[in-house]
Image (tube, grey):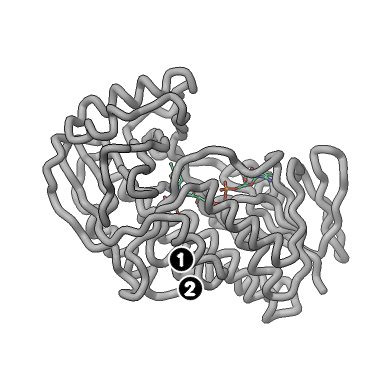
Amino acid sequence: MKHILIAGGGIGGLSAAISLRKAGFSVTLCEAAAENRKTGAGILQPQNALAVLKELGVFEECCEHGFQTAWFKTFDKQGNLLFKVSESFLDDKLPGRNNILRKTLNDILIKHAEASGARILWGKKIVAYEETPEAVTAVCDDGEKMQADILAGFDGIHSIVRDAMLQKEIEKEFLGMGAWRFYIELPDYTFEDATLMYRSGETQIGVVPLAEHAGYVFVLQPCTSDYWDEEETRFDRVKEILSGFPGLDFVTKHMSKEHPVIFNKLEQVAVQEPWYKGRVVIGGDAAHAGAPTLAQGAAMAIEDAIVLSEELKKHDDLETAFQAYDERRAPRALKVQDLSSEIVRRGLKGEPGAEELIGECYAVLREGY
Ligand SMILES: Cc1cc2nc3c(=O)[nH]c(=O)nc-3n(C[C@H](O)[C@H](O)[C@H](O)COP(=O)(O)OP(=O)(O)OC[C@H]3O[C@@H](n4cnc5c(N)ncnc54)[C@H](O)[C@@H]3O)c2cc1C
């Protein structure tokens, strides 16, 4: 039985652990963080994400702990409804979308990975690897060396495994936007069956239901590449942005410092070289981190995990399996990523056409993987 070492216990790495175990491989996963995240914002799971969660065997649990919506409603800053579109684009039997806290999703994936027999090592960062024709040996930050048949790098946008494999530090493209995210409780507001989006100029604010009276808010606004919002100033910054949206008073009045605001600049990594070399392979954000405008990053990472397991099960020869994985995954994931960043670019230039790009993405996603 081949032994596979996974770097990274995010959505991609944990999904890889579950699907590789299902395919009959022995799995050890090394996660740099000392434990699962304690806080965090939410994640939107469109219909294609729900389809892959079904394959992983975690769909029901995700829906049980999440909040399902059928509509995506867009408002102006005053709160006037501009239009609403159905979130269903793939399968009428699935909910339009599920929204879930990232921590909850990770808890579910960790539980299933452990139950499947994967070994998860927390506080174990892979910092380098050495390879011989017979094995790959990962070097951890505590000095431990771990040997395996395959090293799978699902270690995110700043992937060390990817850069070591490509023997260069890959360039991240800044997309011109900052993203603020936070959890919110809304005791006097009841979410119905819609994910809400408010737009004014180049600023977009999403209000995503996670329960009847709780949700997750994301704010997208242009910023320069050298901009950074420190933890101490984020709350006031977001409050100031929201104050320009009277239609969001129902959110602004409940903002609380109890729930930290997360800030990221939107960056993209698109690995055009093969996503494998020798005994090493990459997937998820390590290969294709992108803009969150189509909410596809996690779905693409899970698809990578499932396809990698399928191809490794099908082919004994590593080169053949990795090549088949790359051929199935790279064109699709990079296309979805490109459409996601094009929405950001057009928005920044004030050009219309986002609906057309969303339609194009749905056409790609309907083709299957
Ligand atoms: C603002 C924003 C909003 C988003 N919203 C959505 C959304 O609504 N829906 C959606 O589908 N996607 C969304 N995404 C994208 C999504 O978060 C990512 O695509 C997804 O998390 C990728 O998963 P991953 O496992 O590949 O990487 P990550 O989630 O980054 O996980 C990588 C893991 O590897 C660990 N790690 C890093 N280096 C090492 C190492 N050397 N050794 C061991 N462990 C290591 C990290 O600690 C981390 O746990 C959003 C992204 C952003 C920036």
**Depicted 136 relative to depicted 95: above or below:** above
Q: Quadrant of the N terminus?
A: bottom right
Can residue 278 be seen here? no
Amino acid on which disc 1 is placed: Arg
Instruction: Compare marks 2 and 1 and give the one earlier in the sequence.
Output: 1
Identify the disc placed on residue 190: none
Which residue is rendered at x = 39% and y = 75% of the image? 367
Which residue is rendered at x = 82% and y = 46% of the image? 139
What number of labels is visible? 2
**Depicted 67 relative to depicted 54: above or below:** above
> x%, y% of residue 340?
37, 52
Which residue is rendered at x = 29% and y = 67% of the image? 88
Can residue 238 be seen here? yes
> x%, y% of residue 283?
60, 58
Identify the disc placed on residue 369: 2
Q: Which residue is identified by label 1?
A: 332
Residue ranking furthest to the bottom: 314
User: Residue 221 lies in what quarter of the image?
Assistant: top left
Amino acid on which disc 2 is placed: Tyr
Question: Does the CB distance between marks 2 and 1 fall below 8 Å?
Answer: yes
Q: Is mark 1 within 8 Å of ligand 1?
A: no
Q: Which secondary structure, mark 2?
A: loop
Q: Is mark 2 within 8 Å of ligand 1?
A: no
Which residue is rendered at x = 63% and y = 53% of the image? 154
